[in-house]
Amino acid sequence: MNSEVRKSVTVLTSSTIAFVICFMIWMVFAVLGLPIKQQLHLNETEFGLLTAMPVLSGSLIRVPLGIWADRFGGRIVFFLLMLVCVPAVWLLEYAHTYSQFLWIALWLGLVGGSFSVGTPYVAKWFRKERQGLAMGIFGAGNAGAALNKFLAPVLITAYGWQAVPRVYAVILLVITLLFWFFSYPEPKLANAKQPSLKAQLLLMKNPQVLKYSQLYSVVFGGYVGISLWMVSYYVGEYHFALTQAALLAACFSLPGGVLRAFGGWLSDKYGAYKVTWAVMWVCWIAFFLLSYPQTQMSIRTVSGHLDMHIGLNATVFTILLFVVGVALAIGKASVFKFISDEFPEDMGTVSGVVGLAGGLGGFLLPIMFGVLVDWTGVRSSSFMLMFGTVCISLIWMHFSLKNQKHQ
């Protein structure tokens, strides 16, 4: 193994591990939010806003972080970003009011912008035909959402919710230092082009960038929104304890993260269009089934009343959720394959814009889920909303991307 290959593998490994921890912290309120909800007596809408606040700041920071990564290098930007977020995670333990939780959530949520830094940083270490797989492996750091669901319930059960920010802050600090010592500056050729700030900002108006932003708002935004909501869903709909609910919710978060590398390989082999199109159809079917609420019917027959119950039990629900997690993992990788093919010199900026769209989707969805539950009283209304978004995406893909169908 020559020096450059060894460095590329080391960069990919250290960046992926760092991103796992960043994503774990970004999704912390998926589990931590439940005891806080009970402590502060929050309704579903307020709970949705709390879980979504880190996603908001992590999304808004992605565009400037992507620009800075292109201009100054991904390694230094990634390192400083994680370092800045360590105090926020630690201070979470000392919050007492709802507004304090919201402000600290905004601060620690900046760590979610690490994706738009790490993606171009990793991609610059690999040839174009291998970038889909490399970015997929890095993107598998989304599995941090599942790691949070394994670790946080154990800490809460054993030591109370205040133990979670203490442990997470220490983990983030250690990983930040390890990342710095086990990573390298980008290859010189990758930094040969220094685009002007004006040129980078103009990319935000590019129609292709807007197309990929819409798709990513569904595959990534849907993944984030559902990851944040599912523990609460299992507790409310199926009456599981926190530990059991988090474990079942991980059946969505884990494949939704680790299989992103598989999605990158599929995109390299079959093309981004075909893979994304297939992903949308799988999600369309799954969300349709998940949307159906628990229904009790009494049918009047010639011999009397026939009582019927239609609904998904926890087992079938979890299987369908697993399928959605697999599909979204593949879709997240295929959308970024589009970007690496079309914008190889501006990946930081473009990934920042597209990541912003995906993150904003992840921010809005938990709030909308909460509003729908408070308004309708039907928990599966969250999947009705997801079904509608996928319908729009399929129609949009058919008319706007059909010229790429035979790539």
Image (cartoon, grey):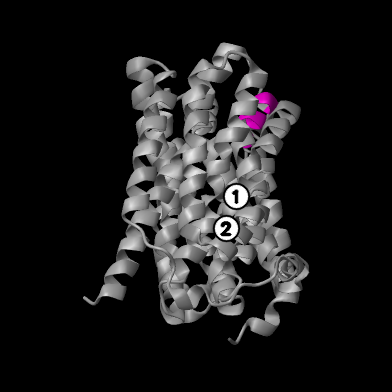
Horizontal and vertical percent for residue 399? 75, 75
Q: Quadrant of the N terminus?
A: bottom left
Res 315 → quadrant: top left
**SS for dot 2:** helix
Relative horizontal placement of residue 122, taking residue 193 as reference (left or right): left
Q: Amino acid at mark 1?
A: Gly
Task: Report the magenta residues as a range.
Answer: 45-52
- Decide if residue 38 is on the left or right side of residue 357: left
Q: Nearer the viewer, residue 186 or 287?
A: 186
Q: Position of residue 85 (x, y in %)?
A: 51, 37
**Point 59% across, 27% down: residue:** 104
Question: Which is more toward the observer, 22 or 367?
Answer: 22
Which quadrant would residue 246 be assigned to in this image?
A: top left
Count how many numbered circles sit on residues in the image: 2
The crowd level at tag 1 (other Cα within 10 Å; few <14, some 14-19, many 20+) is many
The numbered disc on residue 283 is: 2
Residue at 42%, 72% (x, y): give it: 187
Provide the residue designation for mark 1: 222
Residue 78 shown in magenta = no
Q: Main secondary structure of the magenta part?
A: helix
**What is the CA distance from the residue labelled 1 to the residue labelled 2?**
10 Å
The relative height of residue 181 versus residue 46 in the rendered view (above or below) is below
